[in-house]
Image (cartoon, rainbow, N blue to C red):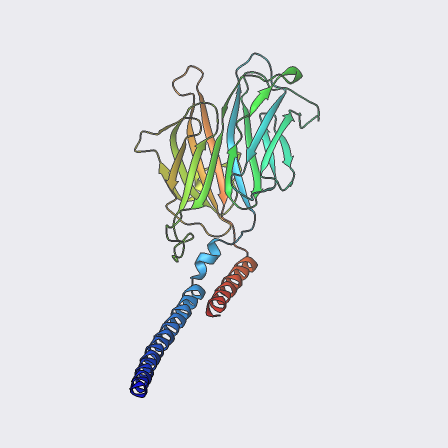
Amino acid sequence: MGLFLDSRYERSASSNISTCNQYTQTALNQKIKIMKLTHSLLKATLNLTVTIPLVSLINYSSALAALVVSSGNVLINDSNVPAEDARIGFKIPGFGEGILGGSINILPIGQVVQIANTGLSVFDQDIFFIDPTTGDRTTIPVNKPVVIDILFDSKKKNAVKWLRDVYLTGPLGVRLPTRNGLAGFVVQPERNPNPLSPLALSSTPLSYTFTNDGNRELFINSILLGRSPNLIERSNFTTSLLEDINIFDNGGRGWSVLPDEQIELDVPFSLSDGEFLVANVVGTLDPGQTNSFSVNFLQQHQESVPEPSSILSLLALGTLGAASTLKRKLR
């Protein structure tokens, strides 16, 4: 009887082992199928990563320095004391920006102040008024508005924003009550919500944004946008120098722009490398007041040129990163 039971138990155990081996083999086959599918998906991922349109990489590459110009900014002395100097400050907004040199032109005396390349994104200095013909210090009478034009090379972004403290100073450095009409702006491509789209940046229209960086209300009658192959001196400006002229006036109503407010417009034309977008902005400082003052800002942005070396480097890095990702996942 004991021998019979032992034989029966042996046959049962052998049957269980066989069944277990079958399940194990089935699981191994399923695992192999999953591994093959994973390998195929990873190969597809690699192909997608490598074939990201080159235009997307170009858009995020660095660019050669480009000129930024803001002309017609005005400081009005509301005291009865002549101005001896001005506190002038502006910056390029954004991370990693830099002013690569430029100049400040102060009217009506015609003084030109050079901007050194300090690698910083901010310029903020007291500037004494100097007669360019004699080299001596001078003053600007109360009834003479001080007009400031700035021109500089930007490191990356084509924009300028005036600092809050821009004012005139009298004897002994005393700050004078100053009304200022200061126009900042930024020109940039409109971003596509899909960063992998071939139309991510460069194929979308440019956006021009005018900002009131001063301390008084501005009423803007109209903004003229045009295209020029060359930088235009403000004293020589005429619409005959422009192509693709478009005039915006908010349906004939104009815009009332308080300090820190802005006007954003889509640029209805494209720019070639090195060309200038020119904005001629006409309006009034302190509209409706007895001491209102007409303003005319001329802003110019030069379309920059992507550096070929940067584009190739980004392309190589993108491909290398994709290959490394695939290798790491297949281990």
In the image, residue 254 lies at what x, y percent?
34, 29
Looking at the image, the residue that sits furthest to the top is 80
Report whether residue 188 is seen. yes
Closest to the observer: 274 or 27? 27
Q: Quadrant of residue 168?
A: top right
Toward the front, the furthest residue is 1
Q: Is residue 3 above or below residue 78?
A: below
User: On the picture, is 303 further left or further right than 99?
Assistant: left
Q: How many marks?
A: 0
Q: Position of residue 61 (x, y in %)?
A: 51, 54
Residue at 46% across, 52% down: 272
Q: Is residue 241 visible?
A: no
Q: Nearer the viewer, residue 81 or 212?
A: 212
- Residue 319's x, y, as percent? 49, 65
Considering the image in quadrants, where does the N terminus appear? Answer: bottom left
**Residue 122 placed where, x, y %?**
58, 36
What residue occupies the far right of the structure in this picture? Answer: 135
At 58% from the left and 42% from the top, the residue drawn is 98
Q: Residue at x 60, y 24 (%)?
A: 86
Q: Is residue 71 above or below residue 66?
A: above
